[in-house]
Amino acid sequence: MATENKNLSEYDKTIIPNAKNFRFGIVVSEWNEQITQGLFQGAFDALIDCGTIKENIVRWDVPGSFELIYGCKKMQKSYDMLDAVIAIGCVIQGETKHFDFVCEGVTQGIKDLNINSDIPVIFCVLTDNTLQQSIDRSGGKHGNKGSEAAIAAIKMAQLRKSAQF
Ligand SMILES: Nc1c(NC[C@H](O)[C@H](O)[C@H](O)CO)[nH]c(=O)[nH]c1=O
Ligand SMILES: CC(=O)[C@@H](O)COP(=O)(O)O
């Protein structure tokens, strides 16, 4: 289902684990800051709404989405008590192919972090054609992808806790 047909901010609290005992790291890209700050707020608010204690949320900022890879890797290693990490970025098509390489690089890098570490990293990186598409997905008409990422983080933290190995 395309984002156009769903609201990214909608979630059913009755089927989401209570996050009161979970601790989350959030790494935020400074590129397109107006968008990434909106994504962060959406994620933060959803985590709190689902029971997270605000002292159990740690935020780091990095220059751009490509640096999310290193920032999330270091966050995984810096806090041995984290239950999940959320990577927040916004990549918008420009004049050149740089968009393609940044998007592919971040995607593959975050995928690798999930393979090589026991702490899940949630992919909250917008890869949009236009600024308007990003506005629409960071608290606009399509809701907030940050909220969606927070719910994914809680669910993955619960899965990690329940898994035996
Ligand atoms: N154009 C965008 C970028 N570009 C910067 C890269 O992410 C990176 O910081 C640079 O190549 C240095 O390593 N980053 C975004 O997050 N969003 C963009 O639209
Ligand atoms: C994703 C990017 O790096 C891109 O927005 C940069 O713009 P341009 O391709 O015009 O250099």
Image (tube, rainbow, N blue to C red):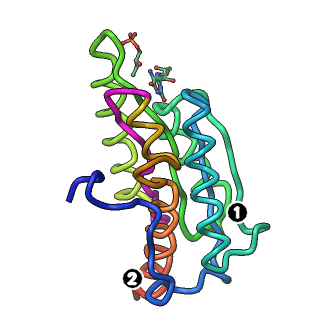
Q: Which residue is mark 1?
A: 57
User: Where's residue 38, x and y in %?
Assistant: 60, 45
At 65% from the left and 63% from the top, the residue drawn is 45
At 60% from the left and 78% from the top, the residue drawn is 50
**Relative to the observer, which residue lies in front, 56 or 44?**
44
At 48% from the left and 83% from the top, the residue drawn is 16
User: Where's residue 61, x and y in %?
Assistant: 66, 38
User: Where's residue 13, x and y in %?
Assistant: 51, 83
Q: Which residue is mark 2?
A: 165
In this view, the mark in front (1 or 2): 1
Which amino acid lies under the numbered mark 1 shown in the image of this protein? Ile
At 57% from the left and 39% from the top, the residue drawn is 36
Location of the C terminus (image quadrant): bottom left
When the figure is inspected, residue 148 is found, relative to residue 30, above or below; the finding is below
Q: Which residues are magenta?
A: 118-131
Question: In the image, is 57 to the left or to the right of 109?
Answer: right
**Residue 124 colored in magenta in the image:** yes
Which element is circle 2 on? loop
Mark 1 vs mark 2: which is more N-terminal? 1
Question: In the image, is 84 to the left or to the right of 108?
Answer: right
Which amino acid lies under the numbered mark 2 shown in the image of this protein? Phe
Question: In the image, is 105 to the left or to the right of 66?
Answer: left
When the figure is inspected, residue 140 is found, relative to residue 94, above or below; the finding is below
**Residue 154 colored in magenta in the image:** no
**Relative to the observer, which residue lies in front, 70 or 149?**
149
When the figure is inspected, residue 12 is found, relative to residue 148, above or below; the finding is below
Location of the N terminus (image quadrant): bottom left
Tally of numbered discs: 2
**Label annotation for residue 159:** none
Q: Residues within 10 Å of mark 2 (few under 14, many from 20)?
A: few
